[in-house]
Image: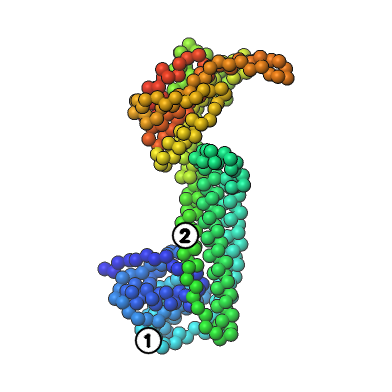
Amino acid sequence: MSKTTIRVTPFGGFDIPGLESWLAAMAAKGFRFTMTTGPLSYFDRDEARTVQVHLEPIQGSTDENPELNDIYEEAGWQYWGMFRGSFYVYASPDLEARAHTDPDTLDYALKKFFRQKLIGGVLLLLANVLLLGLYWQGAPWEIDLLWLQYYPVETLSNGTTIPFLLAALGFLLIDLSYLLGLLHLMRYRRAVHSGGKARGHRGVGWLLAVGLLVLLPVLINTVQLFSGTDYRPYDLEGSGFVTLTDIEGEDFRLSGDFSYNPDYISHGGTLLDPEHWYFRQYGSFLQDQSPYDVPRLEISIVRYPLELLAEMRAEEWSRQKFNGSGDYEALASDYGLDEIRYAPREERTHINELTGEERVFLPGGIFILRRCNTVLFADYYGEQDLTAHLEHFADMLEGL
């Protein structure tokens, strides 16, 4: 049984001279062409042979044409397969054999290929606009470069930056492949009309293949967004998450406002947006009070594809100050955690310079915990000791 070998087609889909010479060169190495899928060509292992390859433009239906195959076979040509629904591929051991493609047929085919390229260009332009527009917020000119300098992991994992950059690179390669392919097709048409000899242009197919490969994760990411798999919340009850009542005590009264006391864990992520969790709870407050006057807890967790990124994100968080928090202290690793950082927050009073109104900010503390490639940020305002609940936080991370 012959073995199938797959190769990237290095020439454009309508580069007839280039494709014919390449398929003949592959046959000389023992690879007999069979079919194509996108930018890939399939070959069966065969004995090395010197052949001449001819691409016959397909007219009408893209099914096999037994009558045409018989005509070519009588002239010493063997049918090998179809190339992208555009050509029948024939091969002959006679290097002087003449293919009988009718000049009018070839001219008609080249005009058809040109129209197909133009229509493909319009569709490609539309794809550029739609996909890049979807992730426009991640464009370099939309990013705070100073923030990127100091907090690169946070900036690049915002859900739009990586998809936009990959989409821009992928489309750059695909668009370049398209333009070069269009240019080469126009040159080939002129050569046919003038009776000159055209040559192939290697590399156009590689641009397309690499561009599609770069674009593939963006397309998967987009499907996840529109299918709703990017957001997968689940119930707080039974989640194992540390809650405000765990810290303040069972008798502590939570806010009755759902926006300040949700009963679920916000959870999501896609291929290019790291898996993340978010949860917050506020104590009950009166109508004339601010929600910031009562104890509260906010938890953010991110799971990165690499442990190095989690280490960098933990370090980024530790360089940020949050409402009067003190310096972070690195605690000894415990409970299966790889990093433990804690910053206390003292009670402080702020006087509004315009109104003279005095406001007291609650004390509390901040945890930054890392377990392998998962990092947690917990910000607590209240009178209790957050470090007393370290084991519970560690169990919560382990259970994710």
Identified by mark 1, the residue type is Asp
Quadrant in the picture for residue 3: bottom left
Measure how far apart labels 2 and 1 are at the Cα level. Answer: 36 Å
Please identify the quadrant where the N terminus is shown: bottom left
Residue marked by disc 1: 94
Looking at the image, what colour scheme do you see? rainbow
Residue that lies at the very extreme toward the top in this rendered image: 251
The quadrant in which residue 10 appears is bottom left
Left or right position of 400 against 2: right
169 is higher (above) or lower (below) than 356: below
Whether 337 is drawn above or below 270: the answer is above
Give the residue type at disc 2: Val
In the rendered image, residue 118, in percent from the top left (x then y), is placed at 60, 67
Give how far across and how far down residue 257 sits, in percent: 58, 21
Percent x, y for residue 252?
50, 13
Determine which residue is flagged by label 2.
210
Q: Relative to the observer, which residue lies in front, 229 or 394?
A: 394
Circle 1 Cα neighbour tier, 10 Å, few/some/many (<14 / 14–19 / ≥20): few
* Residue 111: x %, y % from top left: 59, 75
The residue nearer to you, when weighing 363 against 93, is 363
Query: Are discs 2 and 1 less than 8 Å apart at CB?
Result: no
Helix, strand or loop at mark 1: loop
Q: Earlier in the sequence, mark 2 or mark 1?
A: 1
Nearest the viewer among 240 and 382 is 382
Judged left or right of residue 103, residue 333 is left
Q: Is residue 199 visible?
A: yes
Task: State the SS at label 2.
Answer: helix
- Residue at horizontal 58%, vertical 85%? 194
Q: Quadrant of the C terminus?
A: top left
Residue 215 versus residue 113 in the image, above or below: above
Label annotation for residue 383: none
